[in-house]
Image: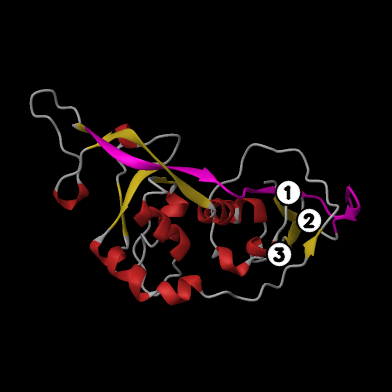
Amino acid sequence: MAKPKSNVAVNTELLAAIKSGKVTHVTQAEAVEAGLQHVPPLVEVNIDPSAIVDGKAPVRLSEAGHKYIPANAETASAPAASPYTIMSGVVLPASKRGGGGGGGAPKKYPFDQLEVGQTFFVPASAAVPDPVKKLGSTVSSANMRYAVETGETKEVERTKRGPGNKAVVDPATGQNVREKKTVPVYKQTRKFTIRPVVGGEKYGDWTAPANGAVIGRVM
């Protein structure tokens, strides 16, 4: 992955979700967003090909990550004013495959204020030419915030990790050692989605003023 940088932005919502066990696997972009490039790194990612599931690698907090969460708890929970207008009557375009992770703290956007069926528009810009790709993980993080424990647990199987977060290899077989772990089961209380829109086209009662993306609450 990319060379570590100092003073990088960290998605504390995603970092907290990793700490709580809501998030166990991440894409490369999500790992960077959670603090992989922070100095020192806030997360440890297992990039062993055998451990990767659906393009996502197992992730856990580093010692620095555990210390970072309490130190930034107030910042992570503080509400922020959003420049985006909440709209009703917008019909979301059909889903298209593609898009990936990206940056941006969920509190920057008005997820908390959205009612079911409401949306907000994020225009494409020179800084963000593809909002769907850029904000994919932001929407995922918002969904994570509204996932609550059901009180049930499930057992998952993962590659066993040793010192330095390296996979433990069975000397007899040369294969990674697998271990089972019990994790909480979560359910969604709200769900958000993102769709690309084309400037000048109508989506229900609304006409897109420019190319960009519409983010909507669907549950």
What amino acid type should be assigned to the residue bearing mark 1? Pro
Q: Which mark is residue 196?
A: 1
Q: Position of residue 78 (x, y in %)?
A: 52, 75
Q: Looking at the picture, does residue 6 appear above or below residue 187?
A: below
Crowd around label 3: few <14 · some 14–19 · many ≥20 (10 Å): few
- Asked whether 192 falls inside the magenta stretch, the response is yes
Q: Quadrant of residue 65?
A: bottom left
Q: Position of residue 39 (x, y in %)?
A: 31, 69
* Residue lying at 78% horizontally and 56% vertically, measured from the top left: 211
Image color mode: secondary structure
Crowd around label 2: few <14 · some 14–19 · many ≥20 (10 Å): many
Q: Residue furthest top?
A: 173
Q: Which residue carries the number 3 mark? A: 125
* Residue lying at 64% horizontally and 36% vertically, measured from the top left: 97
Q: Which residue carries the number 2 mark? A: 211
What amino acid type should be assigned to the residue bearing mark 2? Asn
Mark 2 touches mark 1? (CB < 8 Å): yes
Earlier residue among tags 1 and 3:
3
State which region is magenta: 179-208
Mark 1 touches mark 3? (CB < 8 Å): no
